[in-house]
Amino acid sequence: MAADSTPADGPHPDRGPAANPLGHGPVLLLAGARLADGRVADVRISGDRIQAVGAAGSLGPLTAPPGGPTATTGARIDLTGYLLLPAPAEPHAHYDVAFTTAVPKGATTAPETAAALITRATEAALTSLGYGATAQRTHVRIGDTYGLRRLEAVLTARQTLRGLAELQAVAMPGLLTGLAGADGRAQLREALRLGANAVGGCPDLDPDPAGYVQVLLEAAREADCPVDLHTDGADPAALARLAAALAPLRPRVTLGPCSAMGPDGPGLLAAAGIRVVCLPQNGCCTGIGGRPAGLNPALVAGLANARTLPAAGSGSLRDPANPAGRADPLEAAYLLSAGGGMSVESAYDAVANQARAVLGLPPVRVEAGFPAELLAVRGDSLAGALAGGHSRLVVHSGRIVSRTSAVREFADAVTLALPRQGTPG
Ligand SMILES: [Zn+2]
């Protein structure tokens, strides 16, 4: 599919509910799953919603006919040994540069073709989906040497992935003020016309940060879209000015990764109604202040004290800022818990419903009436899942869209002296 085939009227999830591309899907029964509160339950899904949750065995059996389930008969999936959770979301990715460290040194430096860009962006989104993120937001650089090529590739990937995952693109111009910013301003207008979901960038890298924010705000008002900006938050006075400038657009304002934000920052942003995205896995490629983003325990603690839970994302996926970036929301939650001192419940909430809120999406609970956006992960508790849940099943819009099965084998049989405390993920 060519980059220029992206329709200008693509989906705009932040601008209202999108139609379910799969239509009213089959009934799906997720049987015998453990819920986060410890219950073992059956969960029945109809279309893109959870229809009912009941005690194990109370909603079935739902048997498929010979030849397998069809669109009308439904399917029963045995989730014994799995924990069923609201699906994570990825609130801050950079798919336009994902996997760029995978290119061997000395390889040709010819510009990437549109097809190669689309493939890379699509593979990045599928990587995140395989880990469970059914909704994802990626920042995409525009202008300068990039033009709109990378954005066009991401928008094509967004269209290709409809039905598998919801992908949002944040247009990220370079300079926006003065004569030097004329190209950036024109590219920003064109990016929104093409269908970018939000506007962003790095005001701290513009000679006139306040002017940069004003240009973005005007564009966001005109397009009725959210703002999602990069800042390290190191200067308290600058952060206060930024919060004041952005306040009129709340709650559709997000800042990240705020890796250098001081202890007063969280309260300031909470008072201004501005959401924060942390990137515990080592940040992203914007190079603000030359610091890696990484986990900032003071920020996490400050946000919790300010009663504003942060969202957490992955940032880099094997790009120069983090060649080992994995894009696994459970890894981000693990780091928030293990390195940031958050409870496992809050840490998971940061990568799930808090991340969904950044994307403008409604919350998910494993209860009747909620969106069927679910992650089943091998394990018997949330802590166990964060400790290493490799086997996963992902449900988006009521449909199983990904399944990962891990197998562990040992060369010799071993008789354990103690009862087994769980099953390898
Ligand atoms: Zn970033």
Image (cartoon, rainbow, N blue to C red):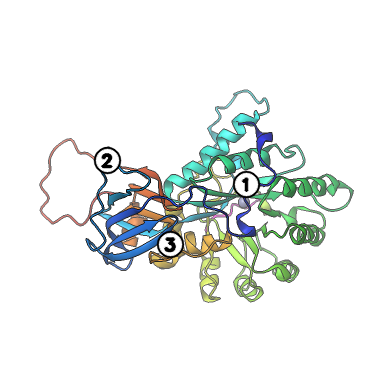
Q: Are the residues at dot 3 and dot 2 in contact (C-beta closer than 8 Å)?
A: no
Query: Which kind of residue does numbered mark 3 sit on?
Result: Tyr
Query: Which kind of residue does numbered mark 1 sit on?
Result: Cys
SS of the residue at dot 1?
loop
Give the residue drawn at x 71%, y 67%. 249
Q: Mark 2 — residue? A: 407
Residue 131 in the image, given as x and y percentages of width and height = 42, 48
Question: Toward which corner of the image does residue 229 lie, by quadrant?
Answer: bottom right
Q: CA distance from mark 3 to mark 2?
A: 25 Å
Q: Mark 1 — residue? A: 285
SS of the residue at dot 3?
helix
What is the span of residues highlighted in magenta in the rendered image?
A: 289-296
Mark 1 nearby-residue class (10 Å; few <14, some 14–19, many ≥20):
some
Q: Mark 3 — residue? A: 348
* Sequence order check, earlier mark of 2 and 1: 1
Give the residue drawn at x 51%, y 70%. 301
Please, is residue 128 above or below residue 351 in the view?
above
**Any part of residue 144 in sight:** yes
In-image side of 320 versus 28 (left or right): right
Residue 341 in the image, given as x and y percentages of width and height = 44, 66
SS of the residue at dot 2?
loop
Mark 2 nearby-residue class (10 Å; few <14, some 14–19, many ≥20):
few
Indicate if the residue with disc 1 has its beta carbon within 8 Å of ligand 1. yes
Mark 3 nearby-residue class (10 Å; few <14, some 14–19, many ≥20):
many
- Dominant secondary structure of the residues highlighted in magenta in the image: loop
Indicate if the residue with disc 2 has its beta carbon within 8 Å of ligand 1. no
Magenta region includes residue 293: yes
Residue occupying the far front of the picture: 72
In-image side of 50 versus 63 (left or right): right
